[in-house]
Image (cartoon, helix red, strand yellow):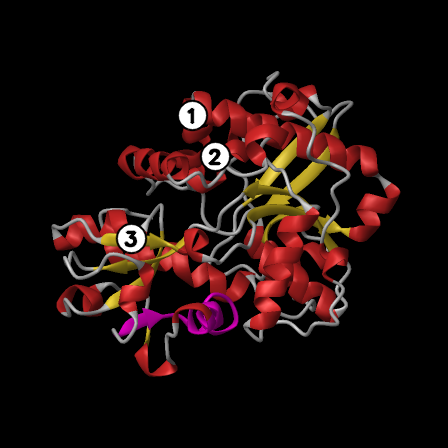
Amino acid sequence: MNPSSPSSATNHRLTRRDFIQYGSICIASSLIAACTNNNQLPTKSSGLDKVTFGTNWIAQAEHGGFYQAIATGIYKDYGLDVTIKMGGPQVGSGTQLLMGGAVDFFMGYGIDAVNAVAQGIPKITVAAIFQKDPQCLIAHPNTAIKTLADLKGKPIYVSASANVTYWPVLKAKYGFSDEQKRPYNFNPAPFLTDKNSVQQGYITSEPFAIQKQGGFKPIVFLLADFGYQTYATTIETKKELVEKNPDLVQRFVDASIKGWYSYLQNPQPGNELIKKDNPEMTDEQITYGIQKLKEYGIIISGAAETQGIGAMTEERWKSFFDSMVSAGIYQPNVNYKDAFTLQFVNKDVGFYQKV
């Protein structure tokens, strides 16, 4: 991705939601082959458990902790030989890849985990790296816009996936209407042209691209701070693996979390691997992404402040589920508790920080 090209940046951050979150579990061999990535550091497999981890898009700062755990040898310390398989426009959905056996773990999303339960798909979330989903709405500088509620009535460019994720929440909580919606074609040009308009984005990407092309700093509303409380950048796997090899799951979770602490302290090792896998990624974009991850508490906030990165709570899952039932996304009889397990996380900050 070339962050100097807003249209490219937007494509790489937003279109992923359309194919990551929703898809059948049937998978073609061509999709598995397309996911293969050979740009990882060479590792000695002798005595190490081989693990494949699928990311939800092309390498970027939002994946930094996983790359860091490879670059610094943290995974090796935990007896793991980890290969990261990047997502991308030619790769199947995470559920397809996971259930089809192309990856052992996948970078998931809380709302999709509950969708999987409703569909009878046997996958489970074992950690939540992002306490907040980076999804945001972006507006032009305007003294009349103070809060998210002030966007009511304005034209808003949103993707199709918004209809089954955050848009119903905005309608229920802030009175937004479907008449406001405009089809989002993953290009900021319509937004930049109409100063009264709004567009969706990712807090770590689109505002940066808009500043580059539009020459102004937009107003940004992180939806997680306005009632949209799904976990993001989760670690999910098959329920079968949790049942048959919980030790492997525990080691992968612990090492990944430690990789994130290491990355936030000194991201250079991980960044080198990110740029190797994604040569179009620049230091400027990575720096911006890391800055926003910290500024908005995407990784360290809530339970993660005391129980470590990756923390999850039953209360948070229930609150999120109830809000989505109220918005009409889930049926109240869905057993949302089957979407996650707390057995691998919630230790304490001190344990995870011993890198």
Left or right position of 20 against 246:
left
Q: Tell how many labels.
A: 3
| Residue 135 rendering spot, x and y as whole percentages | 41, 55
Q: Residue at x 49, y 66 (%)?
A: 18
Q: Residue at x 42, y 41 (%)?
A: 60
> Which numbered marker is on residue 61?
none
Task: Give the residues in magenta.
Answer: 155-172
Question: Quick check: is 168 in the magenta stretch?
Answer: yes
Q: Which residue does the numbered mark 1 point to in the structure image?
A: 267
Identify the secondary structure beneath mark 1: loop
Disc 2 crowd rating (10 Å Cα; few below 14, some 14-19, many 20+) is many
> Magenta stretch: dominant SS?
helix
* First-in-chain label (3 vs 2): 2
| Residue 210 rendering spot, x and y as whole percentages | 21, 53
Residue closest to the far top: 354
User: At label 1, which amino acid type do we have?
Assistant: Pro
Question: Quick check: is 306 in the magenta stretch?
Answer: no
Residue 23 position by quadrant: bottom right
Q: Quadrant of the C terminus?
A: top right
Identify the secondary structure beneath mark 3: strand
Identify the secondary structure beneath mark 2: helix
> Are the residues flagged by discs 3 and 1 in contact, CB closer than 8 Å?
no
User: At label 3, which amino acid type do we have?
Assistant: Val
Q: Is residue 128 above or below residue 329?
A: above
> Which numbered marker is on residue 220?
3
Q: Nearer the viewer, mark 3 or mark 1?
A: 3
**Cα–Cα gap, marks 2 and 1:** 7 Å
